[in-house]
């Protein structure tokens, strides 16, 4: 089980990467996070939206109400340029972290 | 299925976290929950799914959502960013604030109504008074180079600013050649207009040929009067209509030029219409028309000799300085002119004479009236400003209380990074929205009040007319009043509310448990309101007392109901035996009117607002005041019936008799004061005095009556015989017995005059009671205005007291519950809760009392017959304040003491 700190740190990374290629609405994001993490990470109303709003406040993502023909009005989040930069940086450090962990683990197993 | 929107909204509201634009937040969360429910329900069952989802809406998490959302909003385009400055951005932010304020005020209907109403009353009173100030003092006719126009007045023994006589004007005009481009004259006159089936009395101005050229006005239609209308007496049967009368009587018909109107039995051709914005020589009196002074003999049904009387002072003289001539040179000329006149006409120009040149820019209404009008208007302006101040203090106090309650909201917003300036701005905008609503309502109220006031049937002998139409100045004033109110109301609470220690307030879960300091601020405001109300109450009390005193003043005549009619005699019957026969005929017929007991004629009605009549007399053995040719004494010419008809009591000797005719010796009935002044300690009967070359013998002494005003010191006065001193005008008085309607008698008197001679001009018909009440008008209006505004201020202050005590009760509910649970008696609780309210009443009352002593000193001149420190006013007004104050504090306190302590304790 993930500790809350780890969950929080990884959640932002997750949201940014889910939004990298297409805008999504809140419930879509929570379902994707749950399915991609195979149930390890779950976000409910009370935890997902503060996260989204905080990221929005920081300027990483932007939420907009969108009305599509035949559908009701929904709030879609898309990644901002700033968010894309953050995602890049996080990916880099994540890779470095994973590389570091992997090398330690392989060393031990070696 | 559950209504998630409602569920979320209710929970947010319980957390006091709702702000107007949370609709989006609610919508977004509700959509999420709906979809999650749709996914979850098939797996775990609807009931279980609902239960799980509801658990996720725990208060703590929901609060996080709302806070995060608000923080995010600061970065969203709908809520403009606070950083950076541009006008467009500011406008956008303010627009957002306004929308928020409107939503807030819509949710608090009760508060909004009270706030808007009290501001409306305050702003309305101010706007109404300002409209009058605007009409009387600020609106100026479109006269070019007004700074080069001056009015000229004479100093007379009985008037500091007397108008001119026609011969004196002619002397002035001829002596000043080259100095003035124009010298104009104007005289007010009433004239009956024949409408075929009935007559209406119009008020007009008689003017000379320089009048309109001096003003430099342009006619709306046709032409104005000029030198070509000022050539020969009786030869210019033309009139110019005022804009007002043109609209009223001719529906602004531009084809009116060339039409005839019938005035005093003769046709006059309308040659033009005066411009909009020009309403005659004196503000407030609106002439219907302008006619050439050369027609005075025809319009006033007298011989044209009227222009030759040097003692008939009724012409208002205006001059326009010629190019290059300074005001100082005009004044130097006036001095030399006076010296010449004193030498040439010592009889009319005593050595105390002076001639004043008063620049138009220094005149408000007229130098004769400015001494009364300006202070009266100024005190009204101050009074209404105080009423508005009270209204603002009240609202500020309410908003302070609210600000306390909103401290949590504000603290959270500050914690989330909102700047103090943006919060202050938002609170001020909230006050501004209230003020704008109040301003609009106030403007409407002021229009209603003015139309009531201007249509009130005032007992005045001339038509009052004020142009109080809305203009940019009045609108600007209302807007400025609303803006000032918003600042007064909004800034203080805003600064207070945004100052709290952020951490402390957020920590304390109990909403708004602030320190006692803010209560003190509120209390100070309410105490101030009480002080102001008390000052107004005492002033109103003084005016009421003054009114009461005046109503008790005995004018010395006119106790019985009577009809009073002013008439002019037709040109062929205005002198000698034919006039006498006419009067006899009229009186005989009027005596036959059922209920009439006595009929008499007087040429100078006592206590008339528009005219006085005086004579220089000399008494053997007495030296007149230095520089004067004689003693200045008021008089009236009457016939034998007047003493009975007007109820003037004879003390000694006889009255005027029908045998006192032109053929017999001149006689006079003097009043008691005249007897004691000129013949102290001796019997005045049989004594004589001289007026010009005529000697009058005293045949009787009458009780002293009031002559010019009710407040005057007893004034020497004599009655002469009408037959021996005939004039072309007279007032007929017909007394009736109690129980007869004086108005009906007046109507029958006018009918009688029509029967006798249909061409006889009837200028005015009224009753004795109405005639006398005109004298009370200034005091009555003062008492009314101050009374009304004082009542308004008192009402507002009491709402303030009530509000403060209610608030104290509400915020100390827990404390009261505990006290009562511990066995405190309801009375003790009531006393505890009232203490603050009563302290405000006490402190405010003492301050108000001190101020009232100072203020009433200033008003001394407007109050007659009553001491400015009148004990009655100074006792009753504070007592009234105390009673109402206690009531306002008692009601909410008692309500609280009656509540069930268990219920109070359980709610927290």
Image (cartoon, helix red, strand yellow):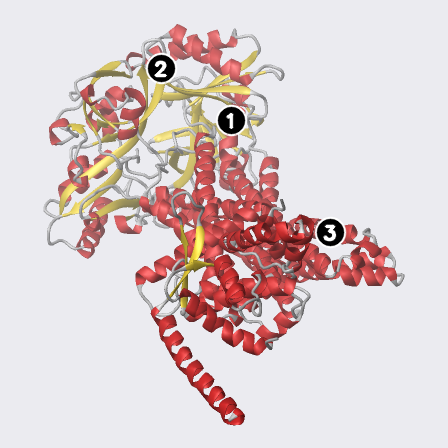
Q: Say whether mark 2 and mark 3 are on the same chain.
A: yes
Are the residues flagged by discs 3 and 2 in contact, CB closer than 8 Å? no
Mark 3: few/some/many CA within 10 Å (<14, 14-19, 20+): many
Query: Which mark sits nearer the N-terminus, 3 or 2?
Result: 2
Query: Which mark sits nearer the N-terminus, 3 or 1?
Result: 1
Q: Nearer the viewer, residue B230 or B685?
A: B230
Spot the residue most to the right.
B823
Give the left or right position of residue B387, taking residue B728 as reference: right
Give me the chain letter of mark 2: B
Query: Which mark sits nearer the N-terminus, 1 or 2?
Result: 2
Residue on which the image places disc 2: B199
Residue on which the image places disc 1: B770
Element on which disc 1 rests = helix
Q: Quadrant of residue B410?
A: bottom right
Give me the chain letter of mark 1: B
* The C terminus of chain B lies in quadrant: bottom right
Give the left or right position of residue B195, taking residue B47 as reference: left
From the image, state whether disc 1 or disc 2 is nearer to you: 2
Relative to B444, say whether B90 is above or below.
Answer: below
Q: Say whether mark 2 and mark 1 are on the same chain.
A: yes
* Distance of label 3 from label 1 (alpha carbons): 48 Å
Residue on which the image places disc 3: B892
Relative to A10, say whether B460 is above or below.
Answer: above
Q: Quadrant of residue A20?
A: bottom left
Are the residues flagged by discs 3 and 1 in contact, CB closer than 8 Å? no
């Amino acid at each position: 089980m993930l500790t809350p700190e780890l969950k929080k740190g990884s959640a932002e990374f997750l949201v940014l990467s889910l939004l990298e290629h297409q805008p999504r609405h809140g419930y879509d994001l929570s379902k994707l996070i749950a399915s991609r993490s195979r149930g390890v990470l779950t976000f409910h109303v009370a935890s997902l939206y503060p996260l989204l709003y905080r990221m929005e406040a920081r300027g990483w993502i932007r939420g907009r109400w969108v009305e599509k023909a035949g559908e009701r009005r929904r709030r879609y989040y898309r990644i901002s340029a700033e968010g894309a930069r953050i995602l890049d940086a996080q990916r880099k450090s994540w890779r470095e972290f994973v590389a570091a962990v992997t090398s330690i683990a392989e060393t031990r197993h070696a | 299925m559950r209504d998630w929107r409602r569920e979320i909204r209710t929970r947010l509201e319980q957390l006091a976290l709702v702000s107007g634009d949370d609709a989006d937040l609610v919508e977004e969360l509700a959509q999420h929950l709906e979809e999650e429910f749709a996914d979850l329900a098939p797996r775990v069952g609807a009931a279980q799914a609902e239960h799980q989802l509801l658990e996720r809406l725990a208060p703590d998490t929901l609060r996080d959502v709302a806070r995060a959302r608000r923080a995010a909003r600061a970065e969203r385009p709908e809520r403009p960013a606070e950083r950076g400055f541009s006008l467009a951005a500011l406008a956008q932010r303010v627009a957002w604030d306004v929308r928020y304020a409107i939503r807030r005020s819509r949710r608090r209907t009760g508060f909004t109504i009270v706030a808007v109403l009290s501001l409306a009353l305050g702003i309305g009173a101010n706007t109404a008074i300002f409209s009058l100030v605007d009409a009387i003092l600020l609106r100026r006719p479109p006269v070019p180079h007004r700074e080069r126009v001056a009015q000229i007045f004479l100093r007379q023994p009985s008037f500091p600013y007397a108008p001119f006589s026609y011969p004196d004007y002619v002397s002035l005009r001829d002596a000043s050649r080259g100095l003035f481009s124009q010298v104009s004259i104007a005289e007010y006159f009433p004239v009956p207009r024949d409408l075929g089936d009935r007559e209406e009395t119009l008020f007009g101005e008689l003017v000379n040929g320089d009048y309109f050229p001096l003003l430099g006005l342009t006619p709306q239609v046709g032409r104005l009067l000029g030198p070509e209308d000022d050539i020969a007496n009786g030869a210019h049967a033309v009139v110019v209509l005022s804009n007002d009368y043109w609209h009223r009587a001719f529906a602004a018909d531009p084809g009116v030029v060339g039409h005839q109107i019938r005035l005093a039995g003769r046709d006059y051709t309308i040659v033009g219409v005066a411009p909009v914005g020009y309403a005659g020589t004196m503000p407030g009196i609106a002439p219907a028309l302008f006619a050439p002074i050369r027609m005075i003999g025809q319009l006033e049904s007298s011989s044209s000799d009227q222009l030759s009387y040097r003692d008939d002072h009724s012409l208002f003289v205006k001059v326009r300085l010629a190019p290059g001539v300074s005001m100082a040179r005009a004044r130097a000329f006036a001095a030399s002119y006076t010296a010449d006149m004193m030498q040439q006409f010592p009889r009319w120009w005593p050595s105390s004479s002076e001639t004043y040149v008063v620049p138009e820019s220094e005149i408000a209404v007229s130098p004769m009236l400015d001494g009364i009008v300006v202070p009266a208007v100024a005190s009204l302006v101050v009074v209404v400003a105080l009423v508005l101040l009270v209204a603002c203090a009240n609202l500020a106090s309410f908003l302070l209380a609210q600000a306390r309650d909103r401290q949590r909201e504000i603290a959270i917003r500050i914690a989330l990074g909102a700047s103090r300036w943006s919060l202050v701005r938002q609170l001020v905008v909230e006050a501004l929205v209230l003020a704008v609503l109040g301003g609009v309502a106030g403007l409407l109220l002021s229009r209603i009040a003015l139309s009531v006031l201007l249509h009130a049937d005032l007992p005045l002998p001339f038509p009052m007319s004020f142009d109080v139409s809305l203009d940019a100045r009045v609108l600007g004033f209302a807007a400025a009043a609303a803006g000032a109110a918003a600042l007064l109301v909004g800034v203080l609470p805003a600064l207070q509310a945004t100052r709290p220690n952020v951490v402390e307030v957020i920590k304390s879960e109990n909403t708004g448990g602030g320190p006692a300091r803010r209560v003190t601020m509120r209390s100070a405001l309410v105490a101030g309101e009480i002080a102001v109300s008390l000052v107004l109450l005492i002033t109103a009390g003084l005016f009421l007392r003054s009114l009461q005193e005046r109503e008790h003043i005995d004018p010395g005549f006119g106790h019985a109901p009577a009809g009073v009619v002013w008439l002019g005699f037709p040109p062929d019957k205005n002198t000698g035996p034919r006039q006498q026969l006419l009067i006899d005929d009229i009186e005989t017929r009027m005596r036959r009117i059922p209920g009439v007991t006595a009929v008499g004629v007087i040429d100078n009605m006592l206590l008339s607002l528009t005219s006085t009549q005086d004579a220089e007399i000399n008494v053997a053995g007495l030296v007149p005041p230095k520089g004067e040719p004689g003693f200045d004494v008021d008089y009236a010419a009457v016939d034998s019936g007047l003493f009975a008809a007007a109820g003037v009591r004879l003390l000694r000797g006889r009255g005027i008799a029908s045998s006192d005719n032109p053929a017999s010796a001149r006689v006079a009935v003097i009043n008691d004061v005249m007897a004691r002044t000129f013949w102290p300690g001796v019997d005045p009967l049989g004594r004589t005095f001289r007026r010009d070359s005529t000697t009058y013998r005293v045949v009787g002494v009458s009780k002293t009556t009031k002559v010019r005003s009710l407040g005057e010191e007893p004034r020497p006065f004599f009655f002469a015989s009408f037959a021996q001193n005939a004039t072309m005008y007279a007032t007929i008085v017909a007394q009736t017995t109690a129980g007869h309607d004086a108005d009906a008698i007046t109507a029958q008197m006018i009918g009688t005059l029509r029967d006798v001679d249909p061409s006889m001009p009837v200028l005015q018909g009224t009753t004795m009671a109405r005639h006398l009440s005109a004298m009370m008008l200034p005091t009555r209006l003062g008492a009314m205005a101050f009374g009304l505004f004082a009542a308004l201020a008192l009402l507002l202050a009491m709402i303030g007291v009530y509000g403060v005590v209610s608030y104290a009760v509400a915020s100390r509910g827990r404390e009261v519950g505990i006290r009562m649970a511990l066995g405190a008696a309801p009375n003790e609780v009531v006393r505890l809760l009232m203490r603050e309210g009563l302290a405000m009443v006490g402190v405010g009352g003492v301050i108000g009392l001190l101020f009232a002593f100072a203020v009433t000193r200033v008003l001394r001149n407007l109050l007659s017959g009553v001491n400015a420190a009148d004990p009655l006013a100074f006792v009753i007004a504070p007592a009234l304040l105390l009673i109402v104050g206690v009531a306002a504090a008692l009601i909410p306190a008692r309500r609280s003491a009656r509540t069930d302590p268990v219920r109070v304790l359980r709610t927290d």
